[in-house]
Image (cartoon, grey):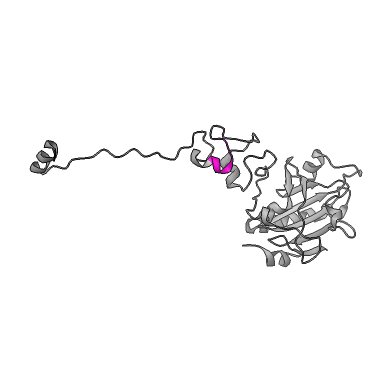
Amino acid sequence: MTRTLILASLLGATVACAPAEVDMPFDGDGDGLMDDVEANYGTLPDNPDSDDDGWLDGEEIDGFTDPTDPADHPYTGGWGIGACRNDVAGETVAVGSVAPNFEGVDQFGDTVRLHDFCHNAVLIVTGSEWCGPCQSYRSTMASYWADYHERGFMIIDLLLETADGSAIDQEALVRWADGHEYAVLDDTNGPISHQGYVNGGIPAISLIAPGGEIVILDGSPSASDIEAILPW
């Protein structure tokens, strides 16, 4: 025993030992991901936005998007993306089937994908600016959105033509959205709608349950229909 420990023992003193140094997790670039886990995601520990898409790597992971893909990022509109989106296997556009994925550009310039809302009840509406009933139905959509969006409800509004029958551009999407908070997508010439969502006139309205199953196709979903499939 050393003289220090002998003396301390005789005097009844406590000898303090210096704590061992431990490497603590560190977020060098401030992106919300610790440096020691960035390799697991393929992100750069010295770049907070590895794919330079305007979103921090940590924000992308939290939002179930790919921080290494500049085309995949959280929505500007703030809509949540489901962790299940890559597990949904689309079938066909028919009642009782899982809807195939589709994508279109929204009023914010984002590419919106149906399967990103795999965790939601989704109302799909097709219309045109020149369509009076479509204009009127927007108040119904706004009411549904106000009542249900916090319970896992999403609306995708597909726009076919402008008031004069022209193709949709970004200005038309913003104009048709008119401040509404759901997604309005460019569907010029109907590449989405004509998959089976429109079988007669417009507005054409369909309802999809969480998981992607089509429960009403080109029909008249009611509030009770929506409430029956809300995830929470």
What residue appears at the point 80 percent right and 38 percent down from the top-left corner?
A: 171
Residue ranking furthest to the left: 10
Q: Is residue 23 above or below residue 190?
A: above
Of residue 20 and residue 210, the one placed in the foreground of this image is: 20
Q: Position of residue 93 (x, y in %)?
A: 81, 60
Residue at (29%, 39%) from the top-left corner?
A: 19
User: Residue 204, image x and y in percent?
Assistant: 84, 58
Vertical position of residue 121 compared to residue 50: above or below: below
Q: Is residue 220 visible?
A: no
Residue 106, image quadrant? top right
Query: Residue 192, can we see it?
Result: yes
Is 211 placed left or right of 203 in the picture?
Answer: left
**Which quadrant of the rendered structure holds the N terminus?**
top left
- Is residue 130 shown left or right of residue 81? right
Q: Position of residue 120 (x, y in %)?
A: 67, 58
Tell which residue pokes out farthest to the front in this image. Answer: 1
Q: Which residues are the magenta region?
A: 38-44
State yes or no: residue 82 in magenta.
Answer: no
The image quadrant where one finds the C terminus is bottom right
- Magenta region includes residue 43: yes
**Residue sticking out furthest to the right:** 165
Q: Would you place residue 26 above or below residue 181 in this image?
A: above
